[in-house]
Amino acid sequence: MGKKKCTFAKKRTFMNASDYIQQLSLLPHPEGGYYRQLFGNDENGKKEISTIYYMLTANDMSAFHRLHGMIEIWYYHAGEPLNIYVIDNAGNLTVYPLSIDNEMQVVIHPEEWFAAEIPSKKGFCLVGCAVAPAFTFENFELGKKEELLKHFPQHAELINRMCKE
């Protein structure tokens, strides 16, 4: 009881971004793209985990950011392949292609800087994101281009493209 019935399962392979936005009740995300909070994001007390749907469209990006004391896992659901760029504390860059043909989930560890985009700049990508312990804005840090360039000059092209400030 209380579960929302899935009304689009039969037409899943033919859905576009607008269909998913409507069917999943996605809202514009402050960073770009669309999202909907699913569990544990109400900020009322400590929760063990939080989850969201998150969609990027062709020219959207998830700018470089990191989480303090939280692990984030991205799960591929539908659409175009997505690249997740992760810079670890030693400055090593790893590119994770998230798609039906590659990995379908990626784990980002605390304190790692990460960003995401659709490399083809076509269509959309729908993912799920789980954060443990539950996401809070006090543990979220948006990357500042100047600071990241100072620490990771070897990744200047990517940082310049994937930072908002």
Image (cartoon, rainbow, N blue to C red):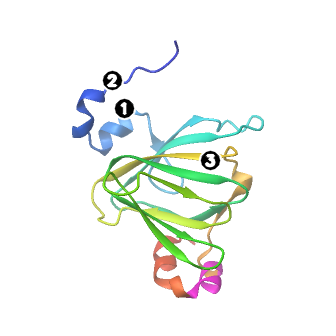
Q: Is the magenta stretch mostly helix, strand or loop?
A: helix
Along the viewing direction, whichever of 34 and 99 lies nearer the viewer: 99
Query: Which residue does the numbered mark 3 point to in the structure image?
Result: 131
> Which segment did they paint magenta?
147-153
Mark carried by residue 73: none
Residue 154 lies, with reference to residue 21, above or below; the image says below
Element on which disc 2 rests: loop
Quadrant location, the C terminus: bottom right
Looking at this view, name the residue that lies furthest to the top.
1
Q: Residue at x 61, y 72 (%)?
A: 88
Q: What residue type is labelled 3?
A: Val
Q: Position of residue 65 (x, y in %)?
A: 60, 64
Q: Where is residue 79 in the image (x, y as percent from the top left)?
A: 31, 49
Query: Whole-Å distance between the Cαs marked 1 and 3?
Result: 23 Å
Mark 3 Cα shell of 10 Å, populated few (<14), some (14-19), many (≥20): many
Mark carried by residue 23: 1
Q: Where is residue 123 in the image (x, y as percent from the top left)?
A: 28, 54
User: Which sits earlier in the primary sequence, circle 1 or circle 2?
Assistant: 2
Query: Whole-Å distance between the Cαs marked 1 and 2?
Result: 8 Å
Q: What residue type is labelled 2?
A: Thr
Residue 84 lies, with reference to residue 70, above or below; the image says below
Residue 141 lies, with reference to residue 162, above or below; the image says above
**In the rendered picture of this protein, how many numbered marks are placed on residues?**
3
Task: Please say whether residue 159 is one of the residues in the magenta stretch.
Answer: no
Mark carried by residue 7: 2
Mark 2 Cα shell of 10 Å, populated few (<14), some (14-19), many (≥20): few
